[in-house]
Image (spheres, coloured by chain):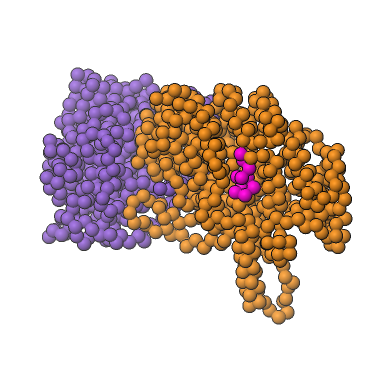
Amino acid sequence: MARDPQAALVALNRFGLGARGGASGDFTSAASDPRGYVKAELAKPGVALLDAPGLQDTPALAKLLFDYQDEVKQQRDAAAKAAVKPDDVKPDKPMIVAAPSDSPVNPAPMASPDAMSAGPQVQPAKPAPQPLNVVQKIYRAEALARFQRASIAEVGFVERLVTFWSNHFCISTNKGQPAHIWAGAFEREAIRPHVLGRFGDMLKAVEQHPAMLFFLDNQQSVGPASKAGQNRKRGLNENLAREIMELHTLGVGGGYTQEDVTSLARIITGWTYAGRDGKLGAAGAFAFNANAHEPGPQTLLRKSYEDTGLAQGEAALADIARRPATAKFIATKFVRHFVADDPPPALVARLADVFGKTDGDLKAMAVALLEADAAWQAPMTKMRTPYEYLIASGRLLARIPEEPGRILGALSLLGQPLWTPAGPNGFADTNAAWASPEGMKLRLDVAAQFASRIADTVDARELLDIVAGQAASPETRQTVERAESRQQALALLLMSPEFQRR
Amino acid sequence: MELTMDCCESATQRGIARRSLLLGSATFAAWAYLPKFARAADGRDPRLVVIILRGALDGLATVAPVGDPDYAALHGSIALTSDGPHAAIGLDSFFALHPAMPEFARMYRDNKAAVVHAVATSYRERSHFDGQDVLESGFAGPGRVQSGWLNRAIENLPRGQRVTSGLAIGPTTPLVLRGAAPTVGWAPATLPQAADDTAMRLLDLYRHRDPQLASSLAQGLQIEKIAARGDEAMKPKPGVNAMRIAAKGAAKLMAADDGPRIAALAFDGWDTHAQEGGPVGRLAQLLGGLDGALSDFESGLGPRWRDTVIVVATEFGRTARINGTEGTDHGTGTVALLAGGAVKGGRVISDWPGLKVANLYESRDLKPTTDLRGVIKGVLQDHLGLSERVLSASVFPDSGAAKPVAGLIG
């Protein structure tokens, strides 16, 4: 039987995505060797990569998007031609792209084929839903692949690292169709290969990914003295440069000035992606547009960078990644995510030290976290995010999602729409964000709805042992045991501190 | 399997779960099973509704033995009385009905409703889950059985042209109706949000274990109440209005010529540990909802009401003596209610054990003297035409000792 139930709870919830139900034996495994249980996942080759059938790379997705946009435009033009009066000709307006109807902010009502668990269905009165367009289809396929991976992951520590870094380097689907169709590919291509690699490599992959370049407008940024700048009178856009330093690396107060922001913006001019004309390469692939690149050397953080074209920016990013302010900023955020809203300073210092000494080895930092006693002994005060909560619920009930709609809808309801934070700083990572009054009430509703559908087939008393074993408090055990129905018992279990806190 | 969160697929930002299923346009094509009497010369076409009250109904508060000299003292401040401003409704010289149930009282006077008192399943422990398993599975003891007695009853009806699958009302099929015989489902368009009772239990847990979450949830619930104000008509109050909405929907479906003949529903919220209330209060509200639901079945079924039996049952009863928080704890003996035009009513059927401490089960609970299985078997035999052999072997396995109660159907 379990040797250290409390540490098992920490292993499963603080570092992982919760125990899986069924015959997984996760709690027992975690209790017999809590640290080893979590660490083992890091040793698996390619554990962070996601390559589900049907998922496509960024250029392929760009082609799908461009084709789709062409088709919409043709239809619109044809419709306009048919409707137009001879004396009422208007100039072409820029194409207005309707928000996808399954945008996570406003989930479309969907028919529920399994609305009832039994037999033939009474048909919904709703009109048939519009067929999904390609952007929506891709988004849902990417979401499903992520949900499935998280649902079956052994511990889920690596998936937690993916969501941490994906939120750190977030983009938002709200930016428009390219971000919507690329959100999943961005995470697969720029985040996953590097979560157990080097920070500098992830930084480069992120800042050169078309999704990020589009999200923070760098594809529009043009060096004022470049060929393109002189010809077209377009100029610098500092958006990406500013967020690189403020949000991605050094952090506010990380010792950079406005002049540094402008310098970095100039340094990364020309970082873009090839358009549908294919002039810069395969449409949708990262490209360096020398014509838009600001010529000449630039001074950044008191260091001069010769104009070596694309390499100028890569050198600058590599240096920023190594700065002590970056180490401290990343370590603070990392500890805040995994341990406490107010991260213990000694633990932050330890991880920043590892980050610095290993040249940003993210696996070394993760291992250092797992080896620190403070990370195991700190009280479990963090709330699970909505994503962690929904995935943990599915894992406990041994359910692998077959379609993404319900989780997407629940994430939106609970304030964490997938790949759609309100700003480039990502979703908040504190209890204030997730334990709000409205948030708790909605969580309870979600738990009750979930329980009302499946509780009849499970016994919440047994599930409590899977969730927390002997670490379950007597009060929680009693609350679950004394519930008046299986539905209520399961809802209460899913809302218990042992399930909500990590 | 699938992570089922239907609520959220079309959830609005306000968090109200909506699932609009068209009521009344359903066609029930799966005609398969036929009550014996449907083909009989008198043209009876019986309907049967089973309502499960989850949480263990206080039978002594629902149908009070006001004539028992020990009742008033045991039930204390929440005891019903035959006089006063909220007097219980006399059923006979001994039993009186809770005043929140005037419709049931009317049916009773009209001989279309009956009470079975001091009744219980074969279960004698005090776990809701296990008690519900026994009640709904129809097996003698708890266990992970995945079929219910009502489903097996349907399965054992002769196959024919006229009777469809069982109808499950609500978000899930209650265990009682699960099994091999086909069922169809229907849920009200607007599912209630998490029940107040669940929220209160969670709040209590948080107060003991997690004050921060307690404060947050308490505020959230408050906000919800304020937001709901003035919107009462639109939103089913969990528990009470939801019962009537479910009943109206079920009745409409069952009234159709090609509608289902057999249905099961489950109502939550009967676990009255604290502040149970007497003639008014929490239990009174719930009983009022149940009473309304019965009358909604009556009006909704129209001419079909004549051939209808509704069985209301709960997993067990509650302690005879009130506890320190003006409520009652898990007990044993309780009531079952029968209502409908086919019921031979106007009676409280009971082998009354008495409420002296020596007569109580484990010195705590109303002692069961009637096996609920016998009551249900009586209904299934006389209303649907199932044989005693089938009832004892298949519908309620190993229940030969629980003889069908005769004469329940008029």
Q: Is residue A42 above or below residue B324?
A: below
| Percent position of residue B360, x then y | 22, 22
| In the image, residue A373 above or below residue A26 | above
Left or right: residue A211 versus residue A26 is right
Tell me the residue at 55%/55% (across/down).
A55
The residue stretch that appears in magenta? A187-196
Does residue B30 lie above or below A323 as drawn?
Answer: below
The residue that appears at 22% across and 38% down in the rendered structure is B139
Question: Which quarter of the picture shows residue B272?
Answer: top left
Give chain A's shade.
orange
Considering only vertical position in the picture, is A173 above or below B284? Answer: below
Q: Of residues B208 and A270, which is closer to you in this image?
A: A270
Residue drawn at x 46%, y 48% is A401
Q: Residue A443 appears at what percent x and percent y?
A: 51, 39
So how many labels did they put on this image? 0
Counting from the top left corner in percent of width and height, residue A364 is at 63, 33
Answer whether residue B79 is magenta in the image: no
At a point 28% along the width and 20% down the height, the residue shown is B73
Does residue A195 belong to the magenta stretch? yes
Residue A235 percent across, percent down from the top left = 83, 55
Res B127 seen here: yes
Seen as rendered, the residue at the extreme bottom is: A86
A480 or A396, nearer to the observer: A396
Q: Nearer the viewer, residue A260 or B245?
A: A260
Q: Colour of chain B?
A: purple
Please identify the dominant SS of the magenta region. Answer: helix
